Image (cartoon, grey):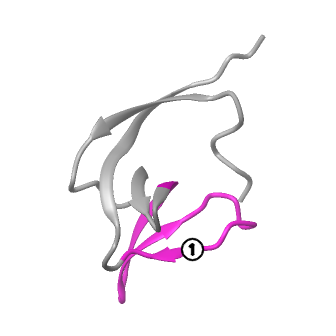
Amino acid sequence: MSPTFLPGDLIIVKRTKSPVPGRAVIVMWDGGLCFKRLHQTRNGPTLKADNPEHPDIEARDGIEYLGEVVSLRRDTL
């Protein structure tokens, strides 16, 4: 899958501590911000990048959900 979000895109994030699986989320992880898609697996929540060049993160201890993406704006000019 190619990246869904591109450089220069503007995203609108709704603050939530309980994001919906399947949505793109912003989390605090390993001392910084991370932007991935939340998936629910047998082993618990996993954060997956839309771009396969970036690794998945098993969302265990140390992950703080900050919000989920609710809108995307992309200039087409």
- Residue plotted at (71% across, 35% down): 7
| Residue 71 lies within the magenta run | no
Q: In the displayed image of the protein, which residue is found farthest to the top?
A: 77
- Position of residue 29 measured from the top left corner of the image (x, y, whole percent): 43, 64
What is the tally of numbered marks visible in this picture?
Answer: 1
Q: Nearer the viewer, residue 13 or 28?
A: 28
Compared with residue 76, is residue 21 higher up or lower down, i.e. above or below?
Answer: below
Image position of 71 (left or right of 45): right
- Position of residue 62 measured from the top left corner of the image (x, y, whole percent): 34, 73
- Position of residue 1 measured from the top left corner of the image (x, y, whole percent): 71, 59
Q: Is residue 23 visible?
A: no
Image position of 36 (left or right of 74): left
Compared with residue 48, is residue 9 higher up or lower down, i.e. above or below?
Answer: above
- Residue plotted at (70% across, 50% down): 3
The residue beneath circle 1 is 56
Q: In the displayed image of the protein, which residue is found farthest to the bottom?
A: 43
Q: Nearer the viewer, residue 33 or 48?
A: 33
Task: Determine whether the residue tagged by mark 1 lies in a helix, strand or loop.
Answer: loop
The quarter of the picture where residue 71 lies is: top left
Compared with residue 68, is residue 72 higher up or lower down, i.e. above or below?
Answer: above
Which residues are the magenta region?
A: 33-59
Q: Nearer the viewer, residue 8 or 4?
A: 8
| Residue 54 lies within the magenta run | yes
Q: Residues within 10 Å of mark 1 (few under 14, many from 20)?
A: some
Amino acid identity at mark 1:
Asp
- Residue plotted at (31% across, 56% down): 65
